[in-house]
Image: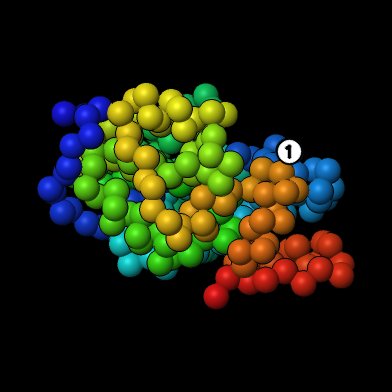
Amino acid sequence: MEGEIATNTDPTRPWSLVVPLKPLARAKSRLTPATGDGLRPRLALAFARDTVAAALSCPAVLDVVVVTDDPEAGAALTATGARIVPDAPGRGLNAALAHGERAVRAGRPRAAVAALNADLPALRPGELARVLDYSAEFPRAFVTDAAGIGTTFLSAAPGVELRPAFGGPSRARHLESGAVEIGLTGIDSVRQDVDTGDDLRAALALGVGAHTAGHWAAGAPGTEPATAP
């Protein structure tokens, strides 16, 4: 039953990922002290492009659905290979994720679905593949963020509702809902979301994707960001 730590033996593959993205003008507001208002929205889009590109490079991923009302982001992420779904509910992050889940399962009712943050610019396809493989053993599973408070990834097996509870101390809420916390080591790129200047520095140290590296170098002269291998 959902809410229990039980294994799921349905090997249905591959995964559909749902990625939520705010309008760029409002995205990543806590980054402003580190980046300024001019660079911040461009970095928010760069994070999303690198996240989606890495996810689509993962062999376990069939498709990525991005829930956004931002036309610039929609065009850029469509070019990256994502499917864009308008944020019809307009009621915040978790409503957007549930809407994306419904959009996926309207076409593939038995899809395995996972929510993934849009701000994982250092994401490695191999690390994501390990997370998805582990998640397949459980009805619902999640990855906590690098701070140990929030959530960057939440999965739902075929026939199981995602029931997202992102935002703030979401680790505790996902645990309380019965989701299994993924305790794998070596998945730093799946955990390192970017909300603050310190988070950005940590992601740059891991090695970010080409879009983030390019915008950061152009917007912050004198920096030499590492790029993801």
| Residue 30 rendering spot, x and y as whole percentages | 74, 38
x 23%, y 42%: residue: 138
Q: Is residue 11 left or right of residue 62?
A: left
Q: Is residue 213 left or right of residue 87?
A: right
| Residue 186 rendering spot, x and y as whole percentages | 45, 60
Foreground: 13 or 171?
171
Residue at the outermost bottom position: 229
Kindly identify which residue carries mark 1: 29
Q: Amino acid at mark 1?
A: Ser
Location of the C terminus by quadrant is bottom right
Disc 1 on helix, strand or loop? helix
Residue at the outermost left position: 9
Display coloring: rainbow
| Residue 159 rendering spot, x and y as whole percentages | 19, 37
x 51%, y 56%: residue: 188
Location of the N terminus by quadrant is top left
- Where, by quadrant of the figure, is residue 163 drawn? top left
Foreground: 12 or 202?
202
Q: Is residue 131 left or right of residue 2?
A: right
- Where, by quadrant of the figure, is residue 23 drawn? top right
